[in-house]
Image (cartoon, helix red, strand yellow):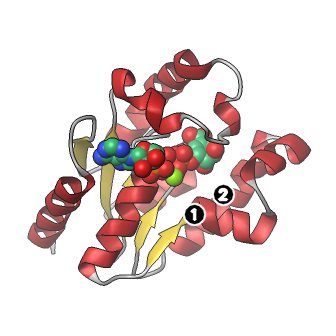
Amino acid sequence: MPIVLVGPMGSGKSRVGARLAASVGAPFVDTDQRIVERHGPIAEIFDREGEAAFRVIEREVVAEALREEAVVSLGGGAVLDADTRADLAGLAVVRLDVRPEAVAPRLSGGTRPLLADGGIERWIRIREERRPLYDEVAGLSIDTTRRSVARIVAEITEWAGGRA
Ligand SMILES: Nc1ncnc2c1ncn2[C@@H]1O[C@H](COP(=O)(O)OP(=O)(O)O)[C@@H](O)[C@H]1O
Ligand SMILES: O=C(O)C1=C[C@@H](OP(=O)(O)O)[C@@H](O)[C@H](O)C1
Ligand SMILES: [Mg+2]
């Protein structure tokens, strides 16, 4: 069964997922990386085809990844898809979060199209809008604001072991 990481942009899903996979000896799938490999840079998909088209591509890649025996890091907006939320029911889903005061350096220099305008205020609004969706799907929530990646990995490993 996969271990799946969800949560807002900059919460550490990609970084923690890679370290967690290495730590438990499982393959790592970052669905955004897979999208980029197949369709090119995410910002270009948004520019060329719009967010709705990106969500269709994302859903396809997420559905495939959730069938793999892997650590799977989703993009922050993947939970907007009702079929994805249904697929997540019963899986080991961890929500990573980060408080607004710590997120700015984590997002700097990034290429996330949803934050191209509006900066941190936009990030706060998106995080609040999606909060109920993360609450719905996650079995464990971790505030990563002041936690090292190593500690987060240890907490997830302990929780997932207790679930097995
Ligand atoms: N626990 C943490 N403490 C400090 N910085 C972190 C932590 N987790 C991730 N980061 C940094 O924050 C940035 C965003 O992380 P990333 O894994 O890409 O987030 P996400 O995939 O959730 O958008 C990266 O530069 C990463 O190194
Ligand atoms: O929150 C979102 O809607 C998005 C989050 C991004 O992934 P991260 O959460 O890994 O930054 C990426 O999928 C895309 O830019 C859209
Ligand atoms: Mg990511």
State left or right for residue 163 relative to residue 34: left
- Amino acid at circle 2: Glu
Q: How crowded is mark 2: few (under 14 residues within 10 Å), some or many (20 or more)?
A: many
Residue that carries the numbered disc 2 in the rendered image? 58
User: Where is residue 64, by image quadrant?
Assistant: bottom right
Indicate whether 25 appears above or below 135: below
Q: Can I make out residue 62 in this image?
A: yes
Task: Look at the picture and state if 157 lies above or below 111.
Answer: below
Residue identifier under label 1: 31
Alpha carbons under labels 1 and 2: distance apart? 7 Å
In the picture, which quadrant includes the C terminus? bottom left
* Residue 16 image offset from top left, x and y in percent: 35, 58
Residue 160 left/right relative to 51? left
Q: Does the residue labelled 2 lie within 8 Å of ligand 2?
A: yes
Instruction: Inspect the image, locate mark 1, and give the three-letter code of the amino acid beneath it.
Output: Thr
Which one is in front in this view, the residue at disc 1 or the one at disc 2? 1
The answer to whether marks 1 and 2 mark residues whose Cβ atoms lie closer than 8 Å is yes
**Who is closer to the viewer here, 163 or 31?**
31
